Image (spheres, rainbow, N blue to C red):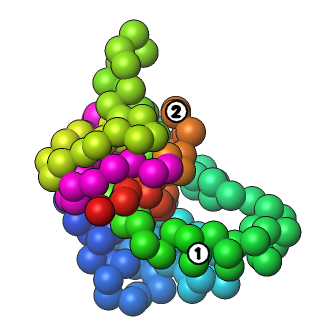
Amino acid sequence: MDIKEIQSLIRFVAKSGASEVKLEMEDIKITIKTGSSDAGPETTFVQQIPMAQAPMQQAPVQAAQPAAEAASSGASSDAKKEDDSKYITIKSPIIGTFYRKPSPDKDAFVEVGSSIGKGDVLCVIEAMKLFNDIESEVSGKIVKILVDDSSPVEFDQPLFLVDPS
């Protein structure tokens, strides 16, 4: 099973509304659990079982924003939502590590204030040793970058705010 098939499975489960899906094959075991908005973030476990070794379980990726921070910013988040409503949010299509640059010695793909077009590469997300270019589906101007460089990201986590005007 390759990364594209896993990504497709995650998208399917997210859209289906199922709370938990388990898939076991000869060399891989996948459990995808989705929670409601008050139950916490979506969690995906992927366990690849080597043929000659005992199974090893990977720890789930932690949420980017701790619950304590979310609770304390409750009143101010309403004001932010009103401001941000005119912007388009570009979200992560996969789970992985977010990188703003193609390599450590290169410049970032985009900065706040950069004009982007449809198909422009905005960032790279590394998932299972594969580097995936994340392209813009809209044209506009980058208003805010919501994730720090080299940070873990979840599926459907907001990455950028874009002003389409």
Q: Residues within 10 Å of mark 2 (few under 14, many from 20)?
A: some
Q: Is residue 155 or residue 138 the one in the foreground?
A: 138
In terms of sequence position, does the residue under pointer 2 or pointer 1 come before the other?
A: 1
The secondary structure that dominates the magenta segment is strand
Residue drawn at (32%, 31%) of the image: 109
Give the quarter of the figure containing the C terminus.
bottom left
Residue lying at 52% horizontally and 33% vertically, measured from the top left: 150
Q: Is residue 159 left or right of residue 27?
A: right
Q: Residue furthest top?
A: 105
Q: Which mark is residue 150?
A: 2
Image x and y of residue 157, in percent: 47, 61
Circle 1 sits on which residue? 81
| Name of the residue lying farthest toward the left | 119
* Tag 2 secondary structure: loop
Give percent across and percent down for residue 41.
Answer: 58, 70
Q: Is residue 148 left or right of residue 131?
A: right
Dot 1: element: helix
Amino acid, disc 1: Lys
For the residue pair 4 and 27, the one nearer the viewer reads as: 4
Q: Measured along the vertical axis of the image, is residue 79 above or below residue 69?
A: below
Instruction: Identify the magenta region.
Output: 126-144
